[in-house]
Image (cartoon, rainbow, N blue to C red):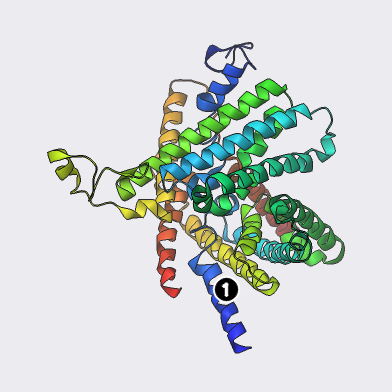
Amino acid sequence: MGEVILNLVGLMITASLVNNVVLSQFLGLCPFLGVSKKTDTALGMGAACIFVITMASLVCSIIYKFILSPLDLSYLQTIVFILVIAMLVQFVEMILKKFVVSLYQALGVYLPLITTNCAVLGVALNNVTDGYSILESVVTGFATAVGFTISIVILAGLREKMEYNDIPAPFKGMPMVLLTSGLMAIAFTGFSALK
Amino acid sequence: MEAKKGALGFKQHTPAERFFNGLIVENPTLVLMIGMCPTLAVTSSAINGLGMGLATTFVLALSNAVISALRKVIPPTVRIPSFIVVIASFVTLVQLLMQAYVPALNAALGVYIPLIVVNCIIFGRAEAYASKNGIVPAFFDGIGMGIGFTCAITCIGLVREFIGGGTAFDVQILGEGTVVPGPVGAFLSGYTPISIFIQQAGAFFVLAFLIAIMNKIKMNMAKKGKDTSKFGQGCCSSAEEAAADKISAEKEARKEANE
């Protein structure tokens, strides 16, 4: 039992910090660059991502384990996963709207944006390639999304501070955000010692 | 631009016009700035960039042709899931072909091959061009856009590889073990590669400078009074930035209403 927990903690640290989804794998760059203007919207996006990525990891690994793998259909995983994720996001949105109104008000606006987040599909596919069990997939999905939240909130904080800085005209906007992310990526390589 | 003339003075919607439009006038990476995830992720070497570019070109051209052929059959309300299924089928095809014939490249590109499905260049072209035009122009639109993407990411890969490892297409040119003979080679072997360029951070830095250069060109063009409307700021990031602005505006309105 203790070994299992230790293994899961190791997975969490690797997925959230060492192999940070944005800064070392370049997945989910669009929301990372697009929704990082303010800390509170970044936090909302992060929370919505934690919710969706964890759910998607669970559903995709169940489908892979009990449907695709026994029927030898694993080559269909890309098509199946993308459709499942698109449906899941719609479904979650409808459920929240109907039953958990407070959560819907907090996360609802971010949900449609998440369908375009390649981190969701990326995590689901990586779980399969790495041969994780269902529990391990869920933990990895959760930790990856936490890693995403950590980096997007840090970037939003930095961008809020930089807003009134005097930046050369061609570097205004996206280039400056990319340079900041580059410096963050250097900082995050420090975590590779944790492996 | 005249009404009947397309890119570079070619007649509109002909194969040649579509090809050069994608390659130069509306280059997806350098001008429209879409599809940034693979641009950053796979450009640690020129070979990887080339492989990714060609795989994307294949998917783009064929999915454009199929979507264009089905444009009168697909009802507009379910067009997005239909496009996704067509694109995902071709991506699976590419994935299986690459596993069979170029396993080393497939291993190097890893999860980014199946992630071509969510590349916004492909979906963007399906929505903006293929679903409205004939099969032949749509096919060549895909080829042009794909080759434009391939050229751009191969160049970015080449720059990163050259500065970060001293190699070009895996041939050692700068630094120790250079293939250049004689005194020139002795001079070149003194170079110490700046390895940060082939690491993750280098991708962000190279892209930042690339966009800054494009911004400068755009500003110069605007100064001369030329049309700069075709320059994009990234598909997803601009759309999401707008959405994020809307979200914070809504929140503030709600806060005020509460008070």
In the drawing, does residue B223 fall left or right of residue B184?
right
Query: Toward the viewer: B33 or B165?
Result: B165
- Which residue is situated farthest in the right direction here? A98
Q: Amino acid at mark 1?
A: Met
Question: If the image is split into quadrants, where does the N terminus of chain B sit?
Answer: top right
Tell me, yes or no, if residue B131 can be seen here: no
Q: Residue at x 54, y 37 (%)?
A: B54
How many residues crowd around disc 1 within 10 Å: few (fewer than 14), some, or many (20 or more)? many
Q: Residue at x 82, y 34 (%)?
A: B76
- The residue that mark 1 highlights is A12
In the drawing, does residue B170 fall left or right of residue B117?
left
Query: Toward the viewer: A48 or B160?
Result: B160
Q: Residue at x 46, y 29 (%)?
A: B218
Q: Residue at x 71, y 23 (%)?
A: B135
**In the image, is residue B178 above or below residue A126?**
above
Query: Toward the viewer: A189 or B109?
Result: B109
Tell me, yes or no, if residue B3 can be seen here: yes
Residue B77 image position (x, y, % from top left): 84, 38
Task: Write down the quadrant of residue A141 in the picture.
Answer: bottom right
Question: If the image is split into quadrants, where does the C terminus of chain B sit?
Answer: bottom right
Chain label for disc 1: A
* SS at badge 1: helix
Residue A144 image position (x, y, % from top left): 59, 65
Residue B172 image position (x, y, % from top left): 29, 45
Residue A24 image position (x, y, % from top left): 48, 59
Task: Write down the quadrant of residue B5 in the picture.
Answer: top right
**In the image, is residue A97 above or below residue B52?**
below
**In the image, is residue B136 above or below residue A152?**
above
- Which residue is situated farthest in the front direction here? B100
- Which residue is situated farthest in the bottom direction here? A2
